[in-house]
Image: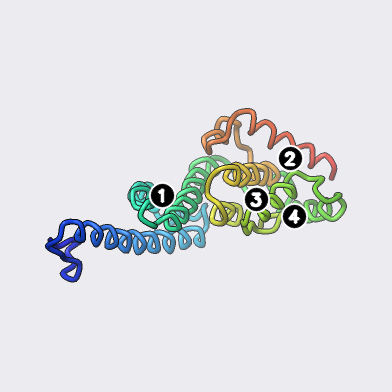
């Protein structure tokens, strides 16, 4: 029995052929995952708002969605690490595609609530230096992510793409996923993007979560 069109992966024993097929499928999935990762990072490097980015990011989001199903089937036979990496990449791709669709409507820029991005960044840094440890929600969220094994970018995030980087590190699900989402929504609110609660719920947040996270951001802003 020849599997995966690989002459070296062949056996007349059906059990051995099945095991070899699974291993071959895992190797293919790992290569496909590596390709998706390279293309996704290339799309983020172009910039979420760049003209060429929508096609790249949307295509990789679709491929990762399909690849997730394959890796879920392979996870029981030792592909858990690949599955978790695919979940991280899929989450980042979904958020980037959402940002393209939502943030391109109307004039939007990082730090839009201020006269310039530099002014916004200065205000955030001053507040960070003056605040007590753990006083601001964003600092608590990033501390929680680091404690969970994530490597979030420092705040204020340098760009929308660096905010998307939140989803590329650490555990891809559970409480960690909610914390990443909270930090992302906080950052968009703090940066001055005019986004409706309904649009933010498209990211998977509950109505109460959106209200709580945005409310905490506005309360923190009042301290500046």
Q: Which residue, given by chain and number where applicable, does mark 4 sit on?
A: 121
Name the residue at 12% across, 62% down: 12
Between circles 3 and 2, the one closer to the viewer is 2
- Check disc 3: other Cα within 10 Å, few if <14, some if 14-19, many if 20+: many
Cα gap from disc 1 to disc 3, whole angstroms: 24 Å
Under circle 1, the secondary element is helix
Cα gap from disc 1 to disc 4, whole angstroms: 31 Å
Q: What is the quadrant of the C terminus in the image?
A: top right
Q: Which residue, given by chain and number where applicable, does mark 3 sit on?
A: 110
Pointers 2 and 1 in contact (CB under 8 A)? no
Cα gap from disc 3 to disc 2, whole angstroms: 15 Å
Task: Tell me the number on the disc at residue 28.
Answer: none
Position of residue 125 in the picture relative to residue 206 (left or right): right
Coordinates of residue 162 in the picture (x, y in percent): 60, 57
Q: Which residue, given by chain and number where applicable, does mark 2 sit on?
A: 217
Coordinates of residue 219 in the picture (x, y in percent): 79, 37
Q: Choose top left, top right, bottom left or bottom right for residue 39.
A: bottom left
Cα gap from disc 2 to disc 4, whole angstroms: 15 Å
Between circles 1 and 3, the one closer to the viewer is 1
Between circles 1 and 4, the one closer to the viewer is 1
Residue at the bottom extreme of this rendering = 8
Q: Which residue, given by chain and number where applicable, does mark 1 sit on?
A: 61
Coordinates of residue 19 in the picture (x, y in percent): 25, 59
Cα gap from disc 3 to disc 4, whole angstroms: 10 Å
Pointers 1 and 4 in contact (CB under 8 A)? no
Q: Choose top left, top right, bottom left or bottom right for residue 17.
A: bottom left
Which of 221/86 is in front? 86
């Amino acid at each position: 029995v020849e599997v995966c069109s690989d002459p070296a992966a062949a056996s007349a024993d059906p059990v051995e052929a099945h095991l070899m097929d699974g291993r071959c499928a895992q190797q293919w999935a790992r290569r496909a995952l590596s390709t998706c990762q390279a293309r996704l990072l290339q799309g983020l490097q172009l910039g979420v708002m760049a003209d060429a980015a929508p096609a790249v990011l949307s295509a990789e989001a679709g491929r990762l969605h399909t690849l997730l199903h394959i890796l879920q089937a392979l996870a029981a036979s030792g592909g858990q690490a690949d599955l978790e990496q695919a979940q991280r990449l899929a989450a980042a791709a979904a958020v980037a595609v959402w940002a393209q669709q939502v943030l391109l409507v109307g004039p939007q820029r990082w730090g839009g609530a201020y006269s310039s991005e530099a002014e916004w960044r200065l205000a955030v840094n001053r507040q960070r230096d003056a605040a007590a440890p753990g006083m601001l929600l964003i600092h608590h969220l990033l501390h929680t992510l680091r404690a969970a094994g994530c490597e979030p970018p420092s705040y204020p995030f340098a760009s929308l793409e660096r905010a998307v980087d939140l989803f590329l590190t650490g555990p891809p699900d559970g409480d960690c996923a909610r914390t990443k989402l909270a930090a992302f929504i906080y950052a968009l609110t703090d940066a001055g993007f005019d986004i409706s609660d309904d649009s933010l719920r498209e990211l998977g947040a509950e109505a109460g979560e959106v209200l709580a996270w945005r409310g905490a951001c506005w309360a923190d802003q009042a301290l500046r």
